[in-house]
Image (cartoon, rainbow, N blue to C red):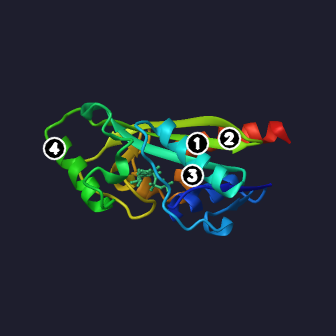
């Protein structure tokens, strides 16, 4: 089955291809001739994820899905949440985002956080959404080099390593994205 994953984030594309396996032929935005940044101007993960999928579906006429993900930190009232990519400013500077997060948490005992992913799928012209969420905590320094984004400071509950230390194969077994994709696959299998 061929379907486009509407993302400009190559690491997300790699993860989704790894999680979905060979049964699904995941097209990138480049594969469908889309070379533009996708707007994310909504105030929720649900809204942004739908915005990206709807834009690609309407403009390029393909079945597609998009993922919007946020890191939600309890002691910061859910920050950075939907603003995770631009937490430290419009430049989408990952190092600066992590620095700002650790500074905000410096005097906080409560380090609980969760990654939440909302996938919006548009197939046969209809929108459906699938959520995946993993709880864990933010440690006080970066550890590991795999993955992307906030992976070096997030340790999932019940684990001792950060996502960036455990590597892609373990992350892709248990992550927020894997949980959302499992629901997506269940839906796609029922449709066949
Ligand atoms: P697209 O919108 O093009 O898919 P993006 O990088 O803008 O790519 P999001 O808006 O969904 O993706 O993600 C916001 C930020 O959240 C992202 O830039 C990362 O810093 C972080 N993030 C998302 N998924 C993550 C993951 O699995 N692990 C660590 N950080 C992640």
Q: Quadrant of residue 157?
A: top left
Estimate the x, y position of residue 93 in percent, counting from the top left. 30, 61
Q: Are marks 2 and 3 in contact (CB under 8 Å)?
A: no
Q: Which class describes the residues within 10 Å of circle 3: few (<14), some (14-19), or many (20+)?
A: many
Residue at screen point 45% across, 60% down:
147
Dots 4 and 2: beta carbons under 8 Å? no
Residue 147 left/right relative to 153: right
Task: From the viewer's perspective, tell me whether residue 145 is left or right of residue 98.
Answer: right
Closer mark to the observer between disc 1 and disc 4 = 1
Asked whether residue 175 appears in the rendered view, the answer is no
The residue under the point 56% across, 41% down is 50
- Point out residue 163 in the picture as x, y percentages from the top left corner: 43, 52
Position above or below: 35 against 142 = below
Mark 1 CB near ligand 1 (8 Å cut):
no
Can residue 123 be seen here? The reply is yes
Camera-nearest residue between 83 and 70: 83
User: Do the residues under discs 1 and 4 have CB atoms within 8 angstroms?
Assistant: no
Secondary structure of the residue carrying tag 3 is: helix
Residue 106: give its label. 4
The furthest residue to the right = 192
Say which element carries label 1.
strand
The disc, 1 or 3, on the residue closer to the chain's N-terminal end is 1
In what element is the residue under mark 4? Answer: loop
Q: Are marks 1 and 2 in contact (CB under 8 Å)?
A: yes
Dot 3 corresponds to which residue? 172
Q: Residues within 10 Å of mark 2 (few under 14, many from 20)?
A: many
Left or right: where 142 falls relative to 55 = left
**Number of the label disc, if any, that sits on residue 82:** none
């Amino acid at each position: 089955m061929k379907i486009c994953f509407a993302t400009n984030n190559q690491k997300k594309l790699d993860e989704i291809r790894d999680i979905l396996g060979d049964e699904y032929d995941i097209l990138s935005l480049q594969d469908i001739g889309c070379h533009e940044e996708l707007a994310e101007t909504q105030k929720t993960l649900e809204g942004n994820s739908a915005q990206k999928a709807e834009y690609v579906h309407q403009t390029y006429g393909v079945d597609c899905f998009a993922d919007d993900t946020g890191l939600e930190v309890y002691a910061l009232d859910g920050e950075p949440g939907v603003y995770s990519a631009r937490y430290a400013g419009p430049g989408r500077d990952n190092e600066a985002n992590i620095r700002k997060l650790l500074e905000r948490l410096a005097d906080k005992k409560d380090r609980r956080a969760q990654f939440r992913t909302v996938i919006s799928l548009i197939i046969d012209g209809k929108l459906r959404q699938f959520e995946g969420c993993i709880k864990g905590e933010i440690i006080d320094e970066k550890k590991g080099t795999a993955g992307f984004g906030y992976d070096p400071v997030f340790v999932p509950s019940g684990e001792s390593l950060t996502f960036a230390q455990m590597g892609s194969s373990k992350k892709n077994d248990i992550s927020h994205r894997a949980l959302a994709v499992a629901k997506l696959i269940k839906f796609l299998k029922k449709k066949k």
